Image (cartoon, grey):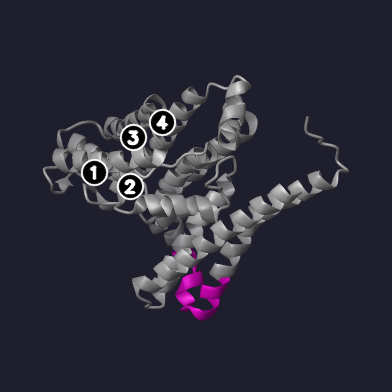
């Protein structure tokens, strides 16, 4: 039995680690933003650029919410980028055929959920590690997107879907952010609530912390894994909808490598690739850190390889800190 007495040093130490895990990414974001605000052009710290950063974060941030659930459950999903591309193709194809935009959007999200169910079933039924399964579905889904689109972009009629991540016109400035950003924040609150206040959230954490112990305690491990992959793919479906909103076309080649950005957002935000740990706030902050780096480097005229090096260094530091934290906990 775990001793949860408030005066125990181990409990205080655990609480300190949790606080550091939460505040660390926030402090990192403040440091990165302050750095570019200080050395970058004056336009970087303007309200217009802050809105642009929020819009650019919505796609990766939304997909990263689902990836947080998977990583907390001890899994990984490399097929997220291909899901996003497939969703843009499905939405564009349905709009082109005259389907109502709301139904087309629902079909795109449902496509993502179906892809997640396939991943979850393959992982649990075949008992193959998630890395291998999702590496295979990465290629499978990308190929399906190219096949549906006949290896070209699908033009779609303009509908209200294009406004999800569009810059706000002057007469709508009271909204602060476009609808897509608010949807991402609402979904973040829902996921955080699931993890903190529901049995499902406790089961997800239990599976990621120690799968065998969770199984012995009566947690339906296979069912939880399938559900987690389906939920995560649903978020990838919403991210695909946002991607379509930005492009207004179905592009089977879009979002190549997006899965790396999504996973990086979770890791930078304090998620542990060992499972059992993750933070929704941290994930959003991790996604923001990468967007701020891209925006700052772009406005300073720096080449892409510079922002890739900086982002890579931040990821390595985040993983190193995670390993150090685990070793410190094991030594207590």
Question: Is there CB contact under 8 Å for labels 4 and 1?
Answer: no
Q: Residue at x 41, y 37 (%)?
A: 129
Give the position of the N terminus as an image quadrant: top right
Identify which residue, 177 or 93, lies in the foreground. 93
Dot 2 or dot 4, earlier in sequence: 2
The residue beneath circle 1 is: 142
Secondary structure beneath disc 3?
helix
Q: Which of the two residues, 326 or 294, is positioned nearer the viewer here?
A: 326
Q: Which residue is mark 3?
A: 112
Q: Is residue 226 magenta?
A: no
Badge 4 is on which residue? 230
Q: Is residue 190 left or right of residue 324?
A: left
Q: Earlier in the sequence, mark 3 or mark 2?
A: 2
With 194 as the anchor, is 123 left or right in this view?
left
User: How many C-alpha atoms fall within 10 Å of the one at disc 4: few (<14), some, or many (≥20)?
Assistant: many
Marks 4 and 3, the one that precedes in the sequence: 3
Residue 107's x, y, as percent?
Answer: 29, 31
Which sits earlier in the primary sequence, circle 1 or circle 3?
Answer: 3
**Distance of label 1 from label 3 (alpha carbons):** 13 Å
C-alpha separation, residue under disc 4 versus residue under disc 1: 18 Å
Q: Residue at x 73, y 50 (%)?
A: 331
Magenta-tinted stretch: 34-50
Kindly identify which residue carries mark 2.
81
């Amino acid at each position: 039995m775990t001793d949860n007495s408030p005066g125990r040093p181990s409990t205080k130490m655990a609480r300190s680690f949790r606080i550091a895990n939460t505040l660390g990414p926030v402090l990192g974001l403040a440091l990165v933003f302050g750095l570019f605000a200080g050395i970058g052009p004056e336009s970087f710290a303007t309200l217009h650029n802050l809105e642009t950063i929020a819009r650019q974060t919505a796609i990766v941030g939304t997909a990263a919410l689902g990836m947080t659930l998977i990583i907390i459950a001890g899994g990984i999903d490399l097929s997220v980028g291909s899901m996003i591309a497939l969703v843009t193709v499905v939405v564009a194809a349905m709009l082109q055929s005259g389907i109502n935009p709301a139904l087309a959007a629902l079909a795109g999200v449902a496509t993502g959920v179906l892809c997640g169910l396939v991943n979850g079933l393959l992982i649990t039924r075949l008992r193959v590690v998630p890395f291998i399964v999702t590496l295979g579905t990465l290629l499978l889904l990308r190929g399906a997107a190219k096949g549906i689109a006949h290896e070209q972009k699908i033009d779609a009629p303009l509908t209200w879907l294009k406004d999800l991540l569009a810059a706000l016109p002057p007469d709508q400035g009271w909204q602060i952010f476009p609808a897509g950003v608010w949807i991402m924040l609402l979904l973040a609150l829902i996921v955080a609530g699931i993890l903190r206040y529901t049995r499902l959230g406790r089961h997800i954490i239990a599976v990621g912390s120690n799968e065998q112990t969770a199984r012995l305690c009566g947690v339906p491990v296979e069912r939880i894994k399938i559900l987690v992959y389906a939920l995560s793919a649903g978020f990838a479906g919403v991210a695909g909808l946002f991607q379509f909103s930005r492009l207004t076309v179905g592009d089977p080649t879009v979002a190549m490598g997006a899965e790396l950005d999504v996973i990086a957002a979770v890791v930078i935000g304090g998620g542990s690739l060992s499972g059992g740990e993750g933070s929704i706030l941290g994930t959003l902050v991790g996604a923001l850190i990468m967007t701020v780096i891209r925006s700052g480097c772009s406005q300073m005229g720096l080449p892409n390889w510079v922002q890739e090096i900086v982002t890579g260094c931040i990821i390595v530091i985040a993983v190193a800190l995670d390993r150090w934290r685990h070793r410190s906990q094991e030594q207590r």
